[in-house]
Image: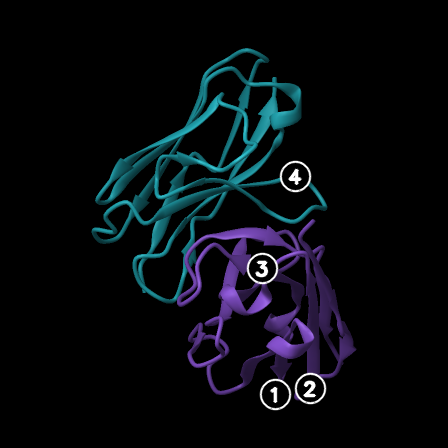
Amino acid sequence: DIQMTQSPSSLSASVGDRVTITCQASQDISNFLNWYQQKPGKAPKLLIYDASNLETGVPSRFSGSGSGTDFTFTISSLQPEDIATYYCQQYDNLPLTFGGGTKVEIK
Amino acid sequence: EVQLVESGGGSVQPGGTLRLSCAASGFTFSSYAMSWVRQAPGKGLEWVSGISGSAGSTYYADSVKGRFSISRENSKNTLYLQMNSLRADDTAVYYCAKDIILLVPSAMDYWGQGTLVTVSS
């Protein structure tokens, strides 16, 4: 199985800050990488697919980049409603696997 | 509007069985792969199983292979997960999720609200 390693596991930032989360795959997954947002008590929401494509309706302050084994997710200007846990997920090989998650809090 | 509504969760003893259902609406159900994803209390997401739009292909995580069975009835717009030989570590919220493509699980763009399965004696 492909292992997905996310870092950091949690972070605290101020409103307006730029936030960056990294995700590393245990092998080359090309661009077969998605990012999800999960707010407390809610189902996950797809934000970015194919490493860098913004899902319809998702604010442009969210972005993703990377290919191969190293990927980055960025919130350009953190907003209070962005408080959530973010997960990366690969689909190069089955089983689908998720990163451990990054909990984002407001400082 | 796409809606996915899970049902069938509950409490069961170790070794027991449960069948989860997911009623779908608002899209052409047979045109998309579907998956079950679970989340143990306070933990991260774990993909459990997936099925192609035609139901011709099924996929499982190693942790549930041989115990769980995924199926779908496209005529009823319903996805199922038959769970046998349940263990304590199967305790989780189980989400039904719609994929963005037909054949193989890849990216899940709509999710249900989840149904809680608790395995305990």
- SS under mark 4: loop
Q: Residues within 10 Å of mark 1 (few under 14, many from 20)?
A: some
Q: Earlier in the sequence, mark 2 or mark 3?
A: 2
Amino acid type of the residue that numbered disc 4 sits on in the rendered structure: Lys
Q: Position of residue A83 (x, y in %)?
A: 62, 29
Residue under circle 1?
A: B85
Q: Nearer the viewer, mark 2 or mark 3?
A: 3
Number of numbered tags placed on the structure image: 4
**What residue is pinned by disc 4?**
A39
Display colour for chain A: cyan
Q: Nearer the viewer, residue B1 or B81?
A: B1
- Is label 3 on the same chain as label 4? no
Question: Could you tell me how far apart the alpha carbons at marks 1 and 4 are, in whole angstroms?
Answer: 32 Å
Looking at the rendered structure, the kind of residue marked 3 is Ala
Say if labels 1 and 4 share a chain: no
**x%, y% of residue A42?**
69, 46
The chain to which mark 2 is attached is: B
Asked if residue A47 lies left or right of residue A68, the reply is: right
Q: Which residue is mark 2?
A: B17
